[in-house]
Image: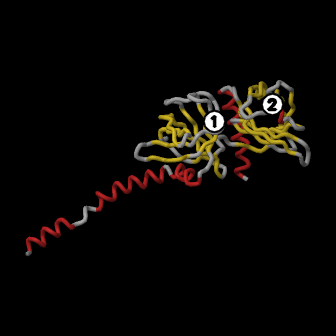
Protein backbone atom coordinates (compact mmCIF):
# COMPACT_ATOMS: atom_id res chain seq x y z
CA UNK A 1 0.00 0.00 0.00
CA UNK A 2 2.83 2.36 0.82
CA UNK A 3 4.45 1.65 -2.58
CA UNK A 4 1.16 2.38 -4.42
CA UNK A 5 0.76 5.68 -2.59
CA UNK A 6 4.34 6.61 -3.46
CA UNK A 7 3.73 5.93 -7.20
CA UNK A 8 0.47 7.89 -7.18
CA UNK A 9 2.15 10.84 -5.50
CA UNK A 10 4.93 10.79 -8.10
CA UNK A 11 2.52 11.03 -11.02
CA UNK A 12 0.26 13.56 -9.32
CA UNK A 13 3.05 16.01 -8.62
CA UNK A 14 2.75 19.34 -10.45
CA UNK A 15 5.53 20.10 -12.98
CA UNK A 16 8.17 22.53 -11.78
CA UNK A 17 6.89 26.11 -11.95
CA UNK A 18 9.63 27.38 -14.35
CA UNK A 19 8.54 24.87 -17.05
CA UNK A 20 5.11 26.46 -17.17
CA UNK A 21 6.00 30.01 -16.24
CA UNK A 22 8.76 30.59 -18.82
CA UNK A 23 6.60 30.07 -21.95
CA UNK A 24 3.86 32.14 -20.33
CA UNK A 25 6.32 34.92 -19.58
CA UNK A 26 7.61 34.89 -23.16
CA UNK A 27 4.06 35.05 -24.52
CA UNK A 28 3.12 37.88 -22.14
CA UNK A 29 6.22 39.80 -23.22
CA UNK A 30 5.29 39.41 -26.89
CA UNK A 31 1.70 40.49 -26.26
CA UNK A 32 2.93 43.55 -24.39
CA UNK A 33 5.41 44.39 -27.16
CA UNK A 34 2.69 44.26 -29.83
CA UNK A 35 0.01 45.85 -27.62
CA UNK A 36 -0.38 48.89 -29.96
CA UNK A 37 -1.27 46.58 -32.85
CA UNK A 38 -3.69 44.52 -30.75
CA UNK A 39 -5.35 47.76 -29.58
CA UNK A 40 -5.81 48.96 -33.17
CA UNK A 41 -7.25 45.57 -34.11
CA UNK A 42 -9.68 45.54 -31.19
CA UNK A 43 -10.91 49.09 -31.89
CA UNK A 44 -11.07 48.42 -35.65
CA UNK A 45 -9.15 51.66 -36.02
CA UNK A 46 -8.40 53.00 -39.50
CA UNK A 47 -4.69 53.27 -40.24
CA UNK A 48 -2.72 54.84 -43.08
CA UNK A 49 -0.98 52.41 -45.43
CA UNK A 50 1.60 53.63 -47.97
CA UNK A 51 3.35 51.56 -50.62
CA UNK A 52 7.04 52.41 -50.72
CA UNK A 53 7.25 51.32 -54.38
CA UNK A 54 4.27 53.18 -55.87
CA UNK A 55 3.95 55.98 -53.31
CA UNK A 56 0.18 55.39 -53.15
CA UNK A 57 -1.52 55.90 -49.77
CA UNK A 58 -4.59 53.98 -48.59
CA UNK A 59 -6.66 53.32 -45.48
CA UNK A 60 -7.17 49.92 -43.93
CA UNK A 61 -7.72 48.06 -40.65
CA UNK A 62 -5.78 45.35 -38.85
CA UNK A 63 -7.68 42.05 -38.99
CA UNK A 64 -5.23 39.77 -37.14
CA UNK A 65 -1.90 39.76 -35.33
CA UNK A 66 -0.45 36.25 -35.50
CA UNK A 67 2.41 35.85 -33.02
CA UNK A 68 3.07 32.22 -33.93
CA UNK A 69 3.51 32.84 -37.66
CA UNK A 70 4.89 36.36 -37.15
CA UNK A 71 2.37 37.88 -39.56
CA UNK A 72 0.00 40.83 -39.61
CA UNK A 73 -3.20 40.78 -41.68
CA UNK A 74 -4.75 43.93 -43.15
CA UNK A 75 -8.24 44.37 -44.52
CA UNK A 76 -8.72 45.45 -48.14
CA UNK A 77 -7.17 48.79 -49.04
CA UNK A 78 -9.27 51.89 -49.67
CA UNK A 79 -9.42 53.29 -52.27
CA UNK A 80 -9.08 49.91 -53.91
CA UNK A 81 -5.84 49.60 -55.93
CA UNK A 82 -5.72 48.10 -59.42
CA UNK A 83 -5.60 44.31 -59.56
CA UNK A 84 -2.18 42.65 -59.34
CA UNK A 85 -0.42 45.99 -58.70
CA UNK A 86 1.20 44.62 -55.50
CA UNK A 87 3.20 41.46 -55.06
CA UNK A 88 5.14 39.67 -52.28
CA UNK A 89 8.20 41.64 -51.27
CA UNK A 90 6.58 45.07 -51.68
CA UNK A 91 7.17 47.15 -48.57
CA UNK A 92 4.28 48.96 -46.89
CA UNK A 93 4.54 51.67 -44.23
CA UNK A 94 1.76 51.72 -41.64
CA UNK A 95 1.00 54.91 -39.70
CA UNK A 96 -1.38 55.85 -36.92
CA UNK A 97 -1.53 59.12 -34.97
CA UNK A 98 -2.67 59.14 -31.35
CA UNK A 99 -2.53 62.04 -28.85
CA UNK A 100 0.40 63.79 -30.48
CA UNK A 101 2.37 60.58 -31.05
CA UNK A 102 2.81 58.48 -34.16
CA UNK A 103 3.09 54.75 -34.73
CA UNK A 104 5.11 54.14 -37.90
CA UNK A 105 6.36 50.75 -39.08
CA UNK A 106 7.56 49.45 -42.44
CA UNK A 107 7.25 45.79 -43.33
CA UNK A 108 7.15 43.61 -46.48
CA UNK A 109 4.11 41.96 -48.00
CA UNK A 110 4.12 38.16 -47.75
CA UNK A 111 0.96 37.28 -49.63
CA UNK A 112 -2.51 38.45 -50.69
CA UNK A 113 -5.37 36.16 -49.71
CA UNK A 114 -9.03 36.31 -50.71
CA UNK A 115 -11.64 36.08 -47.98
CA UNK A 116 -15.36 36.57 -48.71
CA UNK A 117 -14.43 37.95 -52.14
CA UNK A 118 -12.22 40.63 -50.55
CA UNK A 119 -8.41 40.74 -50.53
CA UNK A 120 -6.55 40.31 -47.25
CA UNK A 121 -2.96 41.57 -47.14
CA UNK A 122 -0.65 39.40 -45.05
CA UNK A 123 2.49 41.26 -43.98
CA UNK A 124 5.52 40.21 -42.00
CA UNK A 125 5.09 41.21 -38.36
CA UNK A 126 7.43 44.18 -37.76
CA UNK A 127 10.13 43.90 -35.13
CA UNK A 128 9.81 47.34 -33.53
CA UNK A 129 6.34 48.62 -32.64
CA UNK A 130 5.86 51.70 -30.48
CA UNK A 131 4.42 55.20 -30.55
CA UNK A 132 6.96 58.01 -30.81
CA UNK A 133 6.61 61.74 -30.39
CA UNK A 134 5.81 63.35 -33.72
CA UNK A 135 8.21 66.18 -33.07
CA UNK A 136 11.60 64.99 -34.31
CA UNK A 137 13.40 68.33 -34.31
CA UNK A 138 13.43 71.00 -31.59
CA UNK A 139 11.11 73.83 -32.60
CA UNK A 140 11.00 77.46 -31.50
CA UNK A 141 8.14 79.92 -31.77
CA UNK A 142 8.94 83.22 -33.42
CA UNK A 143 8.05 86.59 -31.96
CA UNK A 144 5.26 88.58 -33.63
CA UNK A 145 7.28 91.70 -32.84
CA UNK A 146 10.20 90.38 -34.93
CA UNK A 147 8.58 88.25 -37.64
CA UNK A 148 10.62 86.10 -39.99
CA UNK A 149 9.73 86.85 -43.62
CA UNK A 150 9.91 83.98 -46.10
CA UNK A 151 9.80 84.09 -49.88
CA UNK A 152 8.22 81.08 -51.58
CA UNK A 153 7.15 79.70 -54.90
CA UNK A 154 3.96 77.69 -54.92
CA UNK A 155 3.76 74.33 -56.74
CA UNK A 156 2.38 76.43 -59.61
CA UNK A 157 5.43 78.73 -59.25
CA UNK A 158 3.29 81.59 -57.99
CA UNK A 159 5.39 83.99 -55.85
CA UNK A 160 4.26 83.98 -52.22
CA UNK A 161 5.36 86.13 -49.31
CA UNK A 162 4.88 84.41 -45.99
CA UNK A 163 5.56 84.89 -42.29
CA UNK A 164 6.99 82.06 -40.18
CA UNK A 165 5.23 81.22 -36.90
CA UNK A 166 7.85 78.69 -35.84
CA UNK A 167 10.92 76.95 -37.18
CA UNK A 168 12.95 73.79 -36.59
CA UNK A 169 15.89 72.11 -38.28
CA UNK A 170 13.39 70.08 -40.31
CA UNK A 171 10.90 72.73 -41.40
CA UNK A 172 8.64 75.61 -40.43
CA UNK A 173 5.03 76.73 -40.01
CA UNK A 174 4.10 79.56 -42.38
CA UNK A 175 1.25 82.00 -42.86
CA UNK A 176 0.31 83.16 -46.37
CA UNK A 177 -2.33 85.87 -46.76
CA UNK A 178 -5.62 84.85 -48.37
CA UNK A 179 -6.92 81.48 -49.50
CA UNK A 180 -4.39 79.51 -51.57
CA UNK A 181 -5.76 76.02 -50.94
CA UNK A 182 -6.34 75.48 -54.66
CA UNK A 183 -2.56 75.47 -55.20
CA UNK A 184 -1.76 73.06 -52.36
CA UNK A 185 -1.67 69.30 -51.97
CA UNK A 186 -0.06 67.13 -49.32
CA UNK A 187 3.54 66.20 -50.24
CA UNK A 188 3.59 68.66 -53.14
CA UNK A 189 6.89 70.48 -53.65
CA UNK A 190 7.50 74.20 -53.28
CA UNK A 191 10.26 74.93 -55.83
CA UNK A 192 11.72 77.78 -53.77
CA UNK A 193 11.89 78.66 -50.08
CA UNK A 194 14.15 81.53 -49.05
CA UNK A 195 14.66 83.34 -45.74
CA UNK A 196 17.40 85.13 -43.82
CA UNK A 197 18.00 84.57 -40.11
CA UNK A 198 20.77 87.17 -39.99
CA UNK A 199 23.09 88.96 -42.43
CA UNK A 200 25.51 86.04 -42.70
CA UNK A 201 22.99 83.20 -42.70
CA UNK A 202 20.59 82.95 -45.63
CA UNK A 203 18.79 79.75 -46.55
CA UNK A 204 17.62 78.82 -50.05
CA UNK A 205 16.07 75.41 -50.58
CA UNK A 206 13.03 73.54 -51.79
CA UNK A 207 10.30 72.38 -49.42
CA UNK A 208 7.58 69.74 -49.17
CA UNK A 209 4.05 70.61 -48.03
CA UNK A 210 3.10 68.43 -45.04
CA UNK A 211 -0.20 70.02 -43.95
CA UNK A 212 -2.27 73.16 -44.49
CA UNK A 213 -5.53 74.83 -43.54
CA UNK A 214 -7.48 78.00 -44.33
CA UNK A 215 -8.38 80.27 -41.39
CA UNK A 216 -10.95 83.08 -41.65
CA UNK A 217 -10.46 84.90 -38.33
CA UNK A 218 -9.09 87.29 -37.22
CA UNK A 219 -8.06 87.65 -40.88
CA UNK A 220 -8.17 85.41 -43.94
CA UNK A 221 -4.98 83.39 -44.22
CA UNK A 222 -3.59 79.98 -45.13
CA UNK A 223 -1.37 78.21 -42.61
CA UNK A 224 1.13 75.79 -44.16
CA UNK A 225 3.55 73.36 -42.53
CA UNK A 226 6.57 72.62 -44.72
CA UNK A 227 9.56 70.30 -44.52
CA UNK A 228 12.90 71.43 -45.91
CA UNK A 229 13.71 69.27 -48.91
CA UNK A 230 17.32 69.83 -49.98
CA UNK A 231 18.92 71.68 -47.09
CA UNK A 232 22.68 71.09 -47.12
CA UNK A 233 24.45 69.38 -44.23
CA UNK A 234 26.35 72.53 -43.28
CA UNK A 235 23.22 74.70 -43.26
CA UNK A 236 21.33 72.04 -41.26
CA UNK A 237 24.09 72.09 -38.66
CA UNK A 238 24.10 75.90 -38.52
CA UNK A 239 20.32 76.00 -38.18
CA UNK A 240 20.41 73.38 -35.42
CA UNK A 241 23.06 75.36 -33.52
CA UNK A 242 21.12 78.61 -33.87
CA UNK A 243 17.86 77.05 -32.64
CA UNK A 244 19.67 75.41 -29.72
CA UNK A 245 21.20 78.78 -28.80
CA UNK A 246 17.80 80.49 -28.94
CA UNK A 247 16.26 77.77 -26.79
CA UNK A 248 18.86 78.03 -24.05
CA UNK A 249 17.74 81.39 -22.56
CA UNK A 250 14.11 80.28 -22.58
CA UNK A 251 14.98 77.06 -20.77
CA UNK A 252 17.10 78.95 -18.25
CA UNK A 253 14.20 81.28 -17.51
How crowded pointer 1 is (Cα within 10 Å; few <14, some 14-19, many 20+) is rated as few
Name the one closer to the observer, 166 or 109. 109
> Mark number for residue 196?
2
Percent x, y for residue 140? 74, 43
Residue 44 shows in this picture: yes
Q: Which mark lies nearer to you, 1 or 2?
A: 1
The residue that label 1 is drawn on is 80
Q: Residue at x 82, y 25 (%)?
A: 156
Say left or right for 187 vs 221.
Answer: left
Residue 200 shows in this picture: no
Of helix, strand and loop, which one carries label 2? strand
CA separation in Å, label 1 and label 2: 45 Å
Q: Residue at x 38, y 52 (%)?
A: 26
Q: Which comes before the other along the chain, label 1 or label 2?
A: 1
> Mark number for residue 244?
none
- Which image quarter is the N terminus in? bottom left
Name the one closer to the observer, 27 or 232. 27
Q: Is residue 250 above or below residue 221?
A: below
Of helix, strand and loop, which one carries label 1? loop
Farthest-out residue, front: 117
Amino acid sequence: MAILQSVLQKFSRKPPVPELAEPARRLAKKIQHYAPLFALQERRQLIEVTSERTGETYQSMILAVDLNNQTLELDELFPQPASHIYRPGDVFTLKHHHQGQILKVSTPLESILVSLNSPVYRLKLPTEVSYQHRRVHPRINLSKQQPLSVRLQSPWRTPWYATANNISTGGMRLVVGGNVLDQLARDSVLPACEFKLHENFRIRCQATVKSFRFVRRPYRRTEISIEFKDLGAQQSLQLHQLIAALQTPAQAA
